[in-house]
Image (cartoon, coloured by chain):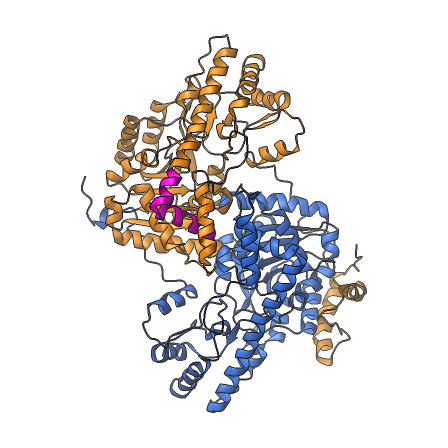
Chain colours: A blue, B orange
Amino acid sequence: MSVSGDHSNSVFANVVQAPEDPILGVTVAYNKDPSPDKLNLGVGAYRTEEGKPLVLNVVRKAEQLLVNDPSRVKEYLPITGLADFNKLSAKLIFGADSVAIQENRVTTVQCLSGTGSLRVGGEFLARHYHERTIYIPQPTWGNHPKVFTLAGLSVKTYRYYNPNTRGLDFEGLLEDLGNAPTGAIVLLHACAHNPTGVDPTSDQWEHIRLLMRSKGLLPFFDSAYQGFASGSLDADASSVRIFVADGGECLAAQSYAKNMGLYGERVGALSIVCKTAEVASRVESQLKLVIRPMYSNPPIHGASIVATVLKDRGMYDEWTIELKAMADRIISMRKELFDALQARGTPGDWSHILKQIGMFTFTGLNADQVAFMRKEYHIYMTSDGRISMAGLSSRTVPHLADAIHAAISNVA
Amino acid sequence: MLSLASVSPSASLSLQKNFKTNWKRGTSSRINFLGSDFSKTKSYTRTSMTVAVKVSRFNDITMAPPDPILGVSEAFKADTNEMKLNLGVGAYRTEDLQPYVLNVVKKAENLMLERGENKEYLPIEGLAAFNKVTAELLLGADNAVIQQQRVATVQGLSGTGSLRLAAALIERYFPGAKVLISSPTWGNHKNIFNDARVPWSEYRYYDPKTVGLDFDGMISDIKAAPDGSFVLLHGCAHNPTGIDPTPEQWEKIADVIQEKNQIPFFDVAYQGFASGSLDEDASSVRLFAARGMELFVAQSYSKNLGLYAERIGAINVVCASSDAAARVKSQLKRLARPMYSNPSIHGARIVANVVGSPELFNQWKEEMEMMAGRIKSVRQKLYDSLCAKDKSGKDWSFILKQIGMFSFTGLSKTQTENMTSKWHVYMTKDGRISLAGLSSAKCEYLADAIVDSYHNVK
C-alpha cells in the first residue's frame, strides 16, 4: 500500500499548527539566533555569573548518595508520592511548628512541580468545590489561565499591577476581591509575583487575609520562589503562614524548580489545609482519583533528592546558603542594571528595578520595544516586557542597558 | 485548635469598610514576619475577626475507595501472615521476590552522574534523544514512517501519562469520537478516558468458556462501532488476560479497522517483556504501520526497563504525512503544557543512554530475556503444579498459552476473595495474577490455593 503526502487521507487534516508557547518559545527563538551577543532573559531559570545553568552542590551530593545506595529500588511510588517528601514539604512551607500539621489537618501530595500541583488542585476543586470560579491576578504567569481552564474552572481576574506606579494596585485588588462571589477561589502568589516582582507588604497581606476570610474566599497559593525571593525561606512563606495560622482552609502549590534548581526533575507538592483531620483524609482520597488517571503516580528521582536534603541538618543548612547566594546575585544584578541605566541617563524612573522582588523584573517596556530589542540587540524576553534577572551577569548588563536605552529612545 | 469569632453577614460588611480606612491610617498590625515566632501571630489573630466559614468547605466530600490495583499492595503490606503472596501489581520480582533494578540502568545512572549533566527544563515534548530512540525501538529505525518523519513523538509520564495526552488530543480534535476498549482491560483505561471526557464502549475480548480470545465477538463489535472510532489494542501481553491475537488474527483485525476507517490506538507497556524479543513484541504495531494506517501508540518503560517510579514513556502518533505529524506534535505540546509544563529528565536520560549505546542495548536485551524467561518458567511450574494437584481433569493449559506478566485465572470474585482471606494470596478481583510476583518456590502453594478456590468456593 503506497503512502503519499496526501493530506486528504489523514484523519489529522483539521489539526492546525499550534503556536510556540509564549514563554518557552522565547528560548526556542533564542537557540535559533546565531549572534554572539544574544542574551536569553526569557525563562526563569537561574544562571551563574558565567551564564551557565547551576546544579547546587548539595543536590549533587544528594544524588551521589542516592545513586550509590545499593538498597534503593525504582518501585512505583504511592499515588500521593514519596511520604517523607510530602511531610518535609509541608513543614517547609507551613513551618516546622505549624499547628495545622500537628493536628493532621494538612494533606500533601507530590506533584509534577508547580504546574502539576496547580493542575491537580484545580481539577480537585472543579469536581468537589461549590464555587467553580478562580480569580487570578492581572497580570499573572502566562500558563495560569490555561492550567485552570483545562482543569475545569472558569477564570476571572482581579486588579494587581498598576502600570503608573509600577507597583501594587491595592485599592483595585481589594475592590475586585470584595466584589467576588462568596466562596470564590483566589490565586495568590506567595512571594516574588511572576511576572511583575511586585508583592504586597506584610500589612497589605494582613488586610487581604481579613477581607478574604470575611467573604469566605478560598486562597490558592502558588509558591514557586520560597527562599529565592528574599533569601529567607521563612520570610518568603509568611503570606501563606498567616492564612494557615488563622485556622482557615487553603491550598498551596509548591515548586522546587527554582529554589533547589531541580527544574527538569519536576518536583513539587500540593497541600490542602482543611478544617479537620477527618476532612483532610477524605480530601486526600479524592486527590488520588484525580492523579491516577493523569499519570498514576509521580516520578521518584527529584523528590528523593529533596527529601534527602531536607531531612539532613547539614545538607539543609548548605542548601540555605546556596539558595541565599542565588538570591543575592539576583539582587546585585538589579543594582547593576539600575546603575547602568542611571549612568546612560536613560529617560524614566527605573527604581522599580530595585523595588521589585524575585527572579523577574517587569520593565514596563512595551511589545514594540521588546521586538526592537530582539531584532537590534538580540535580547530575548517575553513580549510583556518581563526579564529574568537570573539570566543576567555583570558582563552582560551593559549590553542590556544599551538595548533598553535605545528602545526607550527610538521606539514609542 | 484556634477558636474563631463567628462573623455575621452584617458584621463582615462593616469589616470590609473598616479595611479601607484602617490601612490608610496605619493599623495596629505590627507583625514582623522576618524570622518571627509564629506563636505570636496566633495570639494576635485569636482576637481578630476572621473566618466566616465555620464548617469545612470540603465537608460533603466522601471518602474515595482505594484503587483496585494499587490498593492490593496496600492490603498486602498490612497482612502479617508469613505465607502471604503479593500477585497484585505488575511489578517484576526476582526469584527471591525482591524488586529488581536492571544492571544497565545502574550503569546508565553512574554514567550520568559522572558526566554531571545539568537539570534544565526539557522542552515540552521531552528529551529529543529519548524521543528519537523510543520511536525507533517501537517501529524499527529503518521503518519508512520514521524515514519520512511521519511520527509525532512526545515524551509522556509513562504509559498512563502518554494515554492521557492522547485522550486529551482525541477529545479536542475528534469531538464525540468513541474509544473502543477490550472487555476486560487494564482497570485504569476507563478512568483515563472518563477524566479526559472521551466516551468509550467495550468490545468483546475474553471468552471465559475457553479462557481464550473471543475473536468473533471482537471482530463483530469493532464492525458494529461507528466509523472513525478509536480502537484501543494491547500491542502484546494483554493486561489483564495475557491473551494475545495470533499474527493471522492481527491481520483480520487490521482489515476490519481499515474497512471502518477506525483509528488503531495501541497501548504498548510490555515490549520485550512478553516474548523476550523487542522486535517480536512490536510486530502488531509494525503490521498496522506497514499498511500505511495512521495510528496512536502509547509506550511505557516501567516494566521492560524496570523504571516504574521514574515515569517514562511516550505517545507516538503515526500520520499520513510529515506535515500532519508536525501539527499533531504541536497540539500535543499544547495539552502537556497546562498539565505539567514539561516531563521529567531522569528516566528519559536513562532510556536514551541504554537504547543509544550498542553495548548497553545488548546488555539490556539479555536482562530482558532473563526476566521474560523467569516468567515463562514460573508459568510452566505453576501449570505442572496445578496438573499434579488437581485431579478433576480441568484444562489448565491456558496458563501456558497466555503471555506476559499476567495470567487470567478465570477465578470469580468470590473465589478471588477466598484466595486472599484463606490463603493470603493478594490479587485483583478480576481474577488476574501477576506471575512476575511469583517465585518457583511458591508455585505449589499457589496451586493449592487456586485448586481450593476453584473447586470449593462458588
Examine the image and state in which quarter residue A201 appears: bottom right
Is residue B389 visible in this depiction of the protein?
Answer: yes
- The answer to whether residue A86 is above or below residue B453 is below
Quadrant (top left/top right/bottom left/bottom right) for the C terminus of chain A: bottom left
Q: Is residue B247 left or right of residue B298?
A: left
**Which residue is at 53% across, 62% downward?**
A261
Is residue B431 visible in this depiction of the protein?
Answer: no
Is B364 one of the magenta-colored residues? yes
Rendered location of residue A14, percent (x, y): 30, 52
Q: How many marks?
A: 0
Q: Which residues are magenta?
A: B344-365
Rendered location of residue A80, percent (x, y): 59, 46
Which SS type dominates the magenta stretch?
A: helix
- The answer to whether residue A244 is above or below residue B452 is below
Quadrant (top left/top right/bottom left/bottom right) for the N terminus of chain A: top left
Is B273 one of the magenta-colored residues? no
Front residue of this view, candidates B84 and B321? B84
Q: Is residue B373 left or right of residue B420?
A: left
Front residue of this view, candidates A239 and B405? B405
- The answer to whether residue B427 is above or below residue B447 is below
Examine the image and state in which quarter residue B423 appears: top right
